[in-house]
Amino acid sequence: MRPELQAIIDQGLEARSRLAELDNRIEDEIRSLRRKAFDENRELTPEEQDRRRALRAAQSEGRDAFALLAFDRLKLIDQSSELQRLSNELALVNAGLEDDLRELQRIREVAAQAAQVADALVKVVTALAKAAV
């Protein structure tokens, strides 16, 4: 893989890893709140509930960041010189294929005309053979 694309991917993987670590830390803190209440055989206190809501909101924002990161990486890849080079190469290949298609269509037309001429010759030869008998 080209260095430019590899750098984009590597940066994305690093950011994704940091986001995943953050999500795990938040989830651990939420579990810790619930475990403490469970161990003490009680419901979450209003303060703990507020803390849990805040943690869930932060977790949701972190998960939204995953999607934004993916779109950001795709945008950078889409704008990369490597993708532009590949796009140009594909355009050249497509142009060549279009030329080949036109040539094959022309050959098909010539072959159809040749088949008509051959059919006419067969009819003429058949008629001549019958007349000669």
Image (cartoon, rainbow, N blue to C red):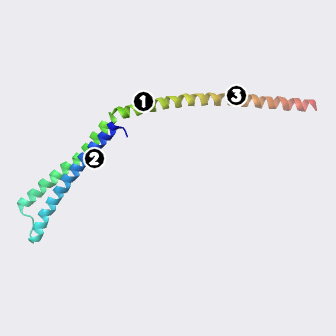
Q: Nearer the viewer, mark 2 or mark 3?
A: 2
**Which residue is situated farthest in the right direction here?**
133
Provide the secondary structure element on which disc 2 rests: helix
Which amino acid lies under the numbered mark 2 shown in the image of this protein? Leu
What residue is shown at x 22% (from left), y 46% (from top)?
Answer: 65
Tell me if residue 78 comes above or below residue 10 in the rendering. Answer: above
Which amino acid lies under the numbered mark 1 shown in the image of this protein? Asn
Viewer-proximal residue, 76 or 106? 76
Please give the residue where the numbered disc 1 appears in the rendered image.
88
Please give the residue where the numbered disc 2 appears in the rendered image.
13
What residue is shown at x 72% (from left), y 29% (from top)?
Answer: 114
How many angstroms separate mark 1 from mark 3 (CA)?
Answer: 38 Å
Q: Nearer the viewer, mark 1 or mark 3?
A: 1
How many angstroms separate mark 2 from mark 3 (CA)?
Answer: 61 Å
Please give the residue where the numbered disc 3 appears in the rendered image.
113
Viewer-proximal residue, 17 or 79? 17
Provide the secondary structure element on which disc 3 rests: helix
Provide the secondary structure element on which disc 1 rests: helix
Viewer-proximal residue, 16 or 113? 16
**Residue 22, position in %: x, y?**
18, 52
Q: Earlier in the sequence, mark 2 or mark 3?
A: 2
User: Label 3 neighbourhood size at 10 Å, few (<14), some (14-19), many (20+)?
Assistant: few
Dot 2 and dot 3 residues touching (CB under 8 Å): no
What residue is shown at x 89% (from left), y 32% (from top)?
Answer: 129
**Residue 5, position in %: x, y?**
33, 38
Which amino acid lies under the numbered mark 3 shown in the image of this protein? Gln
What residue is shown at x 8% (from left), y 69% (from top)?
Answer: 42
Q: Nearer the viewer, mark 2 or mark 1?
A: 2
Dot 1 and dot 3 residues touching (CB under 8 Å): no
**Residue 37, position in %: x, y?**
10, 67
Q: Earlier in the sequence, mark 1 or mark 3?
A: 1
User: Label 2 neighbourhood size at 10 Å, few (<14), some (14-19), many (20+)?
Assistant: some
